[in-house]
Image: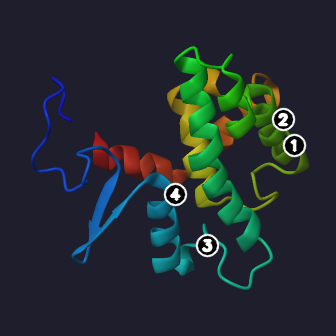
Amino acid sequence: MDGPGAPDISNPHPDKKVPALVDEGSLITESAAICLYLTDKFPANGIGPRVGDPLRGPYLTWLAYNAGVIETVMHMEFGGLMDNAMLRRTFRGRAEVDARILSALNAGPYLLGERFSAADILIGSTGMWMRTMMPAGKIVDDYLARCAARPALARAQAKDG
């Protein structure tokens, strides 16, 4: 969609939504898929654990958990649907999501402990975009500040600006 809400015919996403990445003629859509694609394509950057790395499983879990649970719960909360028992049984609630994020951040400065990853880009960007969609408190404020202070974010914002 463009600013006024009309479909953007140049958008390659099949649903005309974001995100969409075209790389060497290949279309990749959805945030978790793009993170996985880019971190696998550019392993030297070190923000996506490689197959065989003990952090690969937790990394994949955070990517999937964000897409399947965190985003769903945020939309349920934003849309006033948190009282729907079937949705809560299926996707959990805000308290469970907040507890899982806080548990990870209490164990280390990033979701994978000491190691920053594309999962932090994905989940941290949510808090930078809409702080109320992340758990309240200093631990998350500090986490978001660490994510925001990364030089790569400044470079990306300069390209966008």
The residue that appears at 39% across and 50% down in the rendered structure is: 156
* Distance of label 2 from label 1 (alpha carbons): 6 Å
- Packing grade of label 4 (10 A; few <14, some 14-19, many >=20) is many
- Quarter of the image for the N terminus: give it: top left
- In the figure, 73 relative to 32: above or below? above
Tell me the amino acid under the disc marked 1.
Answer: Ser
Q: Is residue 63 left or right of residue 110?
A: left
Relative image position of residue 72 (x, y in whole percent) = 58, 36
Tell me the amino acid under the disc marked 3.
Answer: Gly
* Distance of label 4 from label 1 (alpha carbons): 21 Å
Residue tagged 4: 32
> Contact (CB < 8 A) between labels 2 and 1?
yes
- Packing grade of label 2 (10 A; few <14, some 14-19, many >=20) is few
Earlier sequence position, callout 4 versus callout 3: 4
Residue 42 visible in image: no
Q: Which mark is residue 99?
A: 2
Residue tagged 1: 103
Earlier sequence position, callout 3 versus callout 2: 3
Q: Which mark is residue 37?
A: none
Relative image position of residue 6 (x, y in whole percent) = 13, 30
* Distance of label 3 from label 1 (alpha carbons): 23 Å
Residue tagged 3: 46
- Packing grade of label 1 (10 A; few <14, some 14-19, many >=20) is few
Q: Is residue 56 left or right of residue 105?
A: left
- In the figure, 37 relative to 130: above or below? below
The residue that appears at 61% across and 73% down in the rendered structure is: 46
Q: Residue furthest front?
A: 86
Residue 154 visible in image: yes
> Contact (CB < 8 A) between labels 4 and 3?
no
- In the figure, 100 relative to 2: above or below? below
